[in-house]
Amino acid sequence: MAKTISEKTNKIVNVVISLGAAVVIIGAMAKIIHLSWADWALIVGLLTEAGIFVIYAFLPPPPVDHGGGAVGGGEVNATELVNALNNVQKTVQDVSTNLGMINSSTEGLKNLNNQFLSMSKTIEEMNHFYGSLKEMSTAMNSTVNEAARTKEQMTQLADNLTQLNQVYSKMIHAMQGK
């Protein structure tokens, strides 16, 4: 057995595996939607999947390219490393500062929300008060109208009494013969 497989063999294996997976998916779909041939399709699909696993069992790994560069132990410029760490530290400090400002803003928003709630309650109480004032105004207007009608009726009653007194006065004068 070879230690690695060629690029062409790797491509062929990938195509076979993809086609086999498609057969499995079609079989599973047919079973889910209860097609008449679903049992056979699922059997063929699962056998195909088993065959794919057998192929993978005997397939050597593809070649790995390490890039030809040094792995570990390479030279590191200490100044660059210190600068990078300083940048990280500054970024962490900036994040901390920004989080503090966000916290302050959040507290301010909470206070603003509480003020809005208080204003809402006050407005609700004022609306209730205005409703009461409107009811009182309506009642007073009704009382004024009734007072005007009462005055009118009293004036009419006084006129009627005056007329009646005149009639009685004439009757009394007529009876006395004057």
Image (cartoon, grey):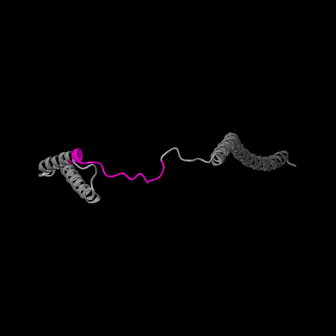
Q: Is residue 125 among the parts visible in the rendering?
A: no
Per the image, is 64 magenta? yes
Residue 35 appears left or right of 129: left
Q: Is residue 92 among the parts visible in the rendering?
A: yes
For the stretch drawn in magenta, what is the main secondary structure?
A: loop
Q: Nearer the viewer, residue 108 or 53?
A: 53
Say how many tags the image has.
0
Q: Position of residue 169 (x, y in %)?
A: 83, 47
Residue in view at x 31 percent, y 51 percent: 62
Q: Position of residue 29 (x, y in %)?
A: 21, 51
Residue at the right extreme, as displayed: 178
Q: Nearer the viewer, residue 152 or 133?
A: 133
Q: Nearer the viewer, residue 46 or 170?
A: 46
Q: Which residues are magenta?
A: 55-70
Q: Position of residue 44 (x, y in %)?
A: 14, 49
Residue at the bottom extreme, as displayed: 8
Residue 7 appears left or right of 96: left
Residue in view at x 15 percent, y 47 percent: 47
Q: Nearer the viewer, residue 33 or 99?
A: 99
Q: Position of residue 4 (x, y in %)?
A: 28, 51
Residue 85 appears left or right of 170: left
Per the image, is 169 magenta? no
